[in-house]
Image (cartoon, rainbow, N blue to C red):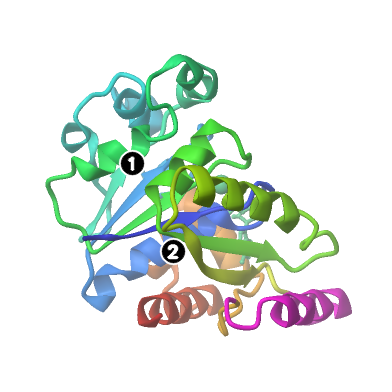
Amino acid sequence: MPRVYAVVNQKGGVGKTTTAINVAANLPQLGLSGLIVDMDPQGNTTSGLGIVRSELSRSVYNVIIDGEDINEIVRPTGVAGLDILPSHRSLAGAEIELINLARRERRLLYALEALRVPYDYIIIDCPPSLGLLTVNCLVAAEYMLIPIQCEYYALEGLGALTHTTQLIQRELNPRLKIGGIVLTLFDPRTTLALQVAQQVRAQYPEKTFRTVIPRNVRLSEAPSHGMPITQYDPTSRGAVAYEELTKELIAR
Ligand code: ADP
Ligand code: MG
């Protein structure tokens, strides 16, 4: 059975996609196989792994809306040992289309259950909302990996996420739990970042990963080259941090 993580936070720009890509890319180096699922219509995970979305004929959209065979649509990435279920712009419409479908909250779960490849880890990159696409992610996952950007309003959004999580645990997925909280875009030169980090740790002492992801320009450059940081600049501070984070996650 794969361990399924949803990288989730309804705020945009907090490092979900960067975390999904770079944790997933570290798995093969640690002897583990992975599948990354891009559930964001913006498709930054897909393009960030070097896949040209306009050339894709089918995507996760066809899997969850049309019920097409996931095994036919999963494809390799440039990282050996890491496959992807790519996203497509059409997924933007899925938020509405799902409403009228049977078992609308479980479409991704059923698709993942039909996978023939026994992956060690499945990492799902969620869109920046708490709509039906994210609900599908949280029903399919056992663990939430929550990136928190070290800034003023960081903790404010956690209330809404906690509320959604409780509803999903009660109604749809009792196994769902917080796998970990990761502090991202950390700039140690600002007092604010230090304060937010301290606050998050005080509130979630067990859940917050020891590893902190620094603000590192190499991490922001890598996606435009279609590479994870492990390939783009494996000795950068960002690369070292994501390797440490992945090790910590696996050890939990
Ligand atoms: P989300 O998926 O939550 O919207 P992203 O991972 O796409 O967030 O990150 C938002 C932007 O910040 C992107 O341009 C990304 O390249 C950049 N970014 C993310 N993490 C870092 C980091 N640790 N250092 C520098 N830039 C980062
Ligand atoms: Mg994203």
* Amino acid marked by disc 1: Leu
Answer with the quarter of the image where residue 158 lies: bottom right
Q: Quadrant of ligand 1?
A: bottom right
| Residue 245 on image: x %, y % | 47, 77
Give yes or no for residue 200 being in the magenta stretch: yes
Q: Which amino acid lies under the numbered mark 2 shown in the image of this protein?
A: Asn
Q: Element under label 2? A: helix
Q: For mark 1, does the 10 Å Cα neighbourhood hold few (<14), some (14 to 19), or many (20 or more) residues?
A: some
* Res. 116 in view: yes
- Residue 126 falls within the magenta-colored stretch: no
Residue at 38% from the left image edge and 27% from the top image edge? 103
Residues drawn in magenta: 187-207
Camera-nearest residue between 111 and 217: 111
Q: CA distance from mark 1 to mark 2?
A: 23 Å
Specify whether 90 is left or right of 14: left
- As drawn, the label of residue 22 is 2
Residue drawn at 77 percent across, 61 percent down: 154
Residue located 37% across and 20% down the image: 102
Q: Which mark is residue 109?
A: 1
Residue 82's place in the image compared with 105, above or below, is below
Front residue of this view, candidates 174 and 228: 174
Image coords of residue 152 (percent x, y): 85, 64
Residue 40 seen in render: no
Instruction: Kindly give the residue lying farthest to the front in the view shown.
Output: 170
State yes or no: discs 1 and 2 in contact (Cβ < 8 Å).
Answer: no
Dominant secondary structure of the residues highlighted in magenta in the image: helix
Which percent across, then down, holds residue 233?
A: 45, 70
**Residue 187 placement, left or right of 192:** left
